Amino acid sequence: MNYQLIQQMNYPQQMNYSQIQNNQNYNDISQQLNNEKLKNKKLEEEIQRLKNKINELKNNNNNLINENNNLKQRLRNLNQFNQLNQMNQFNQMHIYEINNLRQIIIQKDKEINELKSKMPNSKVYMNDIMVINFLSIDQNIRCGISCLADDTFAEVEEKLYKKFNEFRNTNNILLFGGNTILRFKKVRENNIHDGDTILVKPE
């Protein structure tokens, strides 16, 4: 037998170097592919996780928008309620004032009716109204006072003092035609007529 035959007989399972090298390359490539698949899978999982996170954030954002809109609506409602409450308080104040004025009007009407019941039923005409002139010695009083002939002179004098309040503090003598006027007699009883002048003389 020659050497080659002996060699084949001794190593029947032996593979040549090229085949072994090819197998090693295949295993390396296969391992690389598996590694890439794992990486891709992890990337896909990460992408999916991020998508889920984005969806979650979107939902949270939508919820926050809805909550914000609800709060805005509640605030508008609260402002409207406050405005209505202020208007109600304002109206209550006006109602209170109106009721007070009504009571005052009722009281004044009662007083007017009482005065009317005490007054004589005689009517006053324009021709019945007369004006008495008052003149003080120091010329500080120069005015006319309207009255009726049936008024007491004290009533006419009171009208004068409403205009010249400072003369209440003096004891005044009222003279007409050189005679002292009797205050508690009527104007006609003092023989005073329309346009006559009364002299006011402080003591």
Image (cartoon, grey):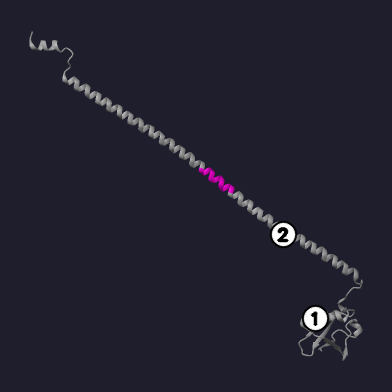
| Rendered image: mark on residue 153 | none
Q: Does residue 176 appear left or right of residue 67 in this picture?
A: right
Magenta stretch bounds: 64-74
Q: Quadrant of the N terminus?
A: top left
- For label 2, count other residues whose C-alpha is less than 10 Å away and answer few (under 14), some (14-19) or many (20+): few
Compared with residue 174, is residue 20 higher up or lower down, i.e. above or below?
above
- Looking at the rendered structure, the secondary structure element under dot 1 is helix
The percent coordinates of residue 40 (x first, y second) are: 34, 31
Q: Does residue 19 appear left or right of residue 92 in this picture?
A: left
Q: Amino acid at mark 1?
A: Tyr
Which residue is at the far bottom? 178
The percent coordinates of residue 163 (x first, y second) are: 77, 80
- Image point (33%, 31%), residue name: 39
Q: Amino acid at mark 2?
A: His
* Circle 1 residue: 161
Q: Main secondary structure of the magenta part?
A: helix
